[in-house]
Image (tube, grey):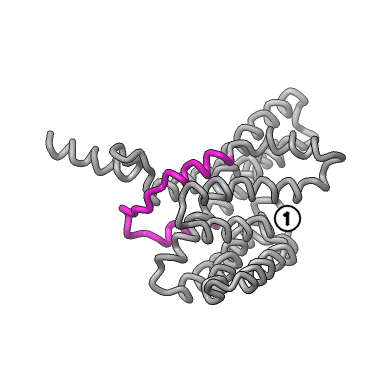
C-alpha cells in the first residue's frame, strides 16, 4: 500500500504539484506534444478531406466542425514550445549542441512537414523547428548584448526579420514571443500576461490582411485562437521542475515522426475514397 501511495504521489508531482498548485516542465512538454498532434490531425488530414469532391455536404459540415475543435485545442501547443525553448536555453550545458540539435531536426522535419500538408518538398514555407532555431539564436544574441537596450532591440528585429524572410511557421510572431518570454522570465505574472497580450497584438497585425476590417480580424482571433490563454496560464503556473531526465531526444523525434505518420494516414484514407 505504501509503495502504491508513493508511486501515486510521484505521478502527481510529475503532472501537478498539489501542494503548490503548479505544473512541472515535463507536464508542459507532454501537453505541448499532445495538443500539437491534435492540431495536426485537423490541419493535415481533416482540412484536406473536407474539400474533396467525393465528400458529401453533410460529411463536409461534420469535418469542418470537428476540425475547428481540434485546431482550438492545437492553439495551446506553440506558446508552450516557446517557453520550453527559453528554459532549454537557460539550463542547457552546451548552447552550441542545443542549437545544432534544433537545426538538424529542423531540416529532418521539412520533408515530413511538406508530406503531411500534401505539398512537394520545397523551402518556401519552413516548419516550426526553424522558428525555434531562429529564436534560440536571437536569445543568444540578446544575452551577448547584456543590458544594451539598443542592441537588444536590433537583435530582436533581426531575428523577427529572419523568421519573416524564411517564412517559418509562426514567422516573426514566434520569434517575438520567444524574446518576450525570455526578457520577462524573472516575473512569471508579467511573463505570462505581457507575452499573451503581445502575441495577440502580433496576430492582429499578421491576420489583418486577411479581413476587410479590424473588427473582423478581432472576431476571427476571438473565435479561433482564444484557447491560447490556457497556454499562458500553464506557463504562469509552471514551477520549472523536471522529473524525467532521460529520453530528451524523444521530444525532438516526435515532431518529424508524427508528421510523417499523419501523411501516411491521409494517403491511406484517400485510397478508399
- Give the image location of residue 36, x and y in percent: 55, 46
Q: How many marks?
A: 1
The residue most toward the right is: 212
Is 222 situated above or below 124? above
Along the horizontal axis of the image, is 223 left or right of 5? right
Helix, strand or loop: magenta stretch = helix
Q: Which residue corresponds to the image point at 53% horizontal and 61% vertical from the top-left?
A: 183
Q: Which residue corresponds to the image point at 77% horizontal and 33% vertical from the top-left?
A: 54
Element type at mark 1 = loop
- Quarter of the image where the C terminus is located: top right
Q: Is residue 16 magenta?
A: no
> Residue 66 appears in which quarter of the rendering?
top right
Q: Which residue is mark 1?
A: 119
Q: Which residue corresponds to the image point at 80% horizontal and 35% vertical from the top-left?
A: 215
> Residue 40 appears in which quarter of the rendering?
top right
Along the viewing direction, whichever of 67 and 156 lies nearer the viewer = 156
Residue 201 appears in view? yes
Along the viewing direction, whichever of 112 and 128 lies nearer the viewer = 128
Q: Is residue 247 magenta?
A: yes
Along the viewing direction, whichever of 193 and 13 lies nearer the viewer = 193
Magenta-highlighted residues:
228-255
Give the crowd class for mark 1: few <14, some 14-19, many >=20 residues within 10 Å. few
- Give the image location of residue 81, x and y in percent: 52, 53
The residue most toward the top is: 58
Is 13 situated above or below 106? above
Along the viewing direction, whichever of 1 and 26 lies nearer the viewer = 26
Residue 261 appears in view? no
Is 160 situated above or below 13? below
- Give the image location of residue 49, x and y in percent: 71, 38
> Residue 55 appears in which quarter of the rendering?
top right
Q: Which residue corresponds to the image point at 68% horizontal and 64% vertical from the top-left?
A: 160
Along the horizontal axis of the image, is 94 left or right of 121? left
Amino acid at each position: 500500500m505504501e509503495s502504491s501511495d508513493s508511486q501515486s504521489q510521484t505521478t502527481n508531482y510529475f503532472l501537478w504539484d498539489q501542494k503548490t498548485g503548479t505544473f512541472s516542465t515535463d507536464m508542459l512538454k507532454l501537453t505541448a506534444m499532445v495538443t500539437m498532434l491534435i492540431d495536426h490531425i485537423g490541419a493535415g488530414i481533416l482540412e484536406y478531406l473536407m474539400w474533396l469532391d467525393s465528400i458529401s455536404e453533410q460529411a463536409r459540415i461534420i469535418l469542418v466542425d470537428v476540425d475547428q475543435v481540434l485546431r482550438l485545442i492545437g492553439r495551446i501547443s506553440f506558446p508552450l514550445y516557446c517557453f520550453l525553448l527559453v528554459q532549454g536555453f537557460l539550463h542547457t550545458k552546451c548552447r552550441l549542441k542545443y542549437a545544432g540539435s534544433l537545426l538538424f531536426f529542423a531540416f529532418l522535419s521539412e520533408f515530413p512537414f511538406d508530406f503531411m500538408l500534401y505539398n512537394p518538398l520545397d523551402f518556401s514555407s519552413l516548419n516550426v523547428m526553424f522558428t525555434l532555431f531562429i529564436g534560440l539564436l536571437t536569445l543568444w544574441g540578446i544575452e551577448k548584448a547584456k543590458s544594451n537596450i539598443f542592441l537588444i532591440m536590433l537583435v530582436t528585429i533581426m531575428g523577427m526579420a529572419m523568421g519573416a524572410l524564411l517564412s517559418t511557421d509562426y514567422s516573426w510572431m514566434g520569434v517575438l514571443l520567444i524574446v518576450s518570454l525570455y526578457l520577462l522570465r524573472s516575473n512569471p505574472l508579467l511573463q505570462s500576461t505581457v507575452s499573451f497580450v503581445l502575441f495577440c497584438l502580433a496576430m492582429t497585425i499578421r491576420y489583418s490582411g486577411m479581413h476587410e476590417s479590424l473588427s473582423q480580424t478581432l472576431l476571427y482571433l476571438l473565435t479561433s485562437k482564444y484557447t491560447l490563454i490556457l497556454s499562458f496560464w500553464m506557463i504562469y503556473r509552471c514551477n520549472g521542475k523536471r522529473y524525467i531526465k532521460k529520453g530528451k531526444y524523444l521530444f525532438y523525434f516526435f515532431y518529424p515522426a508524427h508528421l510523417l505518420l499523419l501523411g501516411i494516414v491521409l494517403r491511406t484514407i484517400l485510397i478508399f475514397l
